[in-house]
Image (spheres, helix red, strand yellow):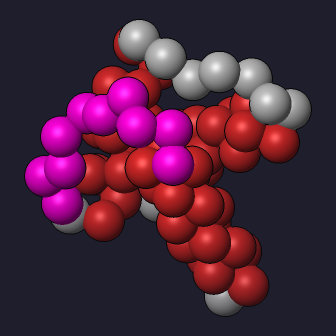
Amino acid sequence: MTEEQLSKISKFKRMLDEGKRISGSQVKELTDLYNAVFGTRLATTSCSSCIRQRIGRLYSQLAKENAS
């Protein structure tokens, strides 16, 4: 992962932990980041549980990379 991707993952995790709403262009940014990291082609969604799952999976990937 690039430094920019790592920074974005941390930003989204912090927003989630603080209970801030992720919407609009941030959802697209999150989806683009997720697709880039995992090589998928998921669509942008406003489903809050889907957004939380994506952030959680990205954060898990970040933790794995930091453990290496």
Please tell me in which quadrant of the rendered image residue 20 appears.
top right
- As drawn, the residue found furthest toward the bottom would be 68
49 or 27, which is in the foreground?
A: 49
Task: Indicate the quadrant containing the C terminus: top left, top right, bottom left or bottom right.
Answer: bottom right
* Residue 10 vertical placement versus 58 (above, below): above
Q: Would you say the magenta stretch is mainly helix, strand or loop?
A: loop
Q: Residue furthest top?
A: 24
Farthest right residue in view: 18
Residue at 26% across, 51% down: 35
Residue 2 at what x, y percent from top left? Answer: 48, 51
Residue at 57% of width from left, 23% of height from top? Answer: 22
In magenta segment, residue 18? no
The image shows residue 58, relative to residue 66, as above or below, that is: above
Q: Could you tell whether 38 is left or right of 10 in the image?
A: left
Q: Residue 50 vs residue 40: left or right?
A: right
Percent coordinates x, y for residue 43 in the rendering: 18, 40
Q: Which residues are magenta?
A: 40-49
Residue at left offset 18%, top offset 60%: 40
Would residue 51 be visible to someone looking at this image?
yes
Residue at figure coordinates x 25%, y 33% from the top left: 44
20 lies left or right of 51: right
Q: How many marks?
A: 0
Pick the residue in front: 36 or 31.
31
Q: Residue furthest left?
A: 41
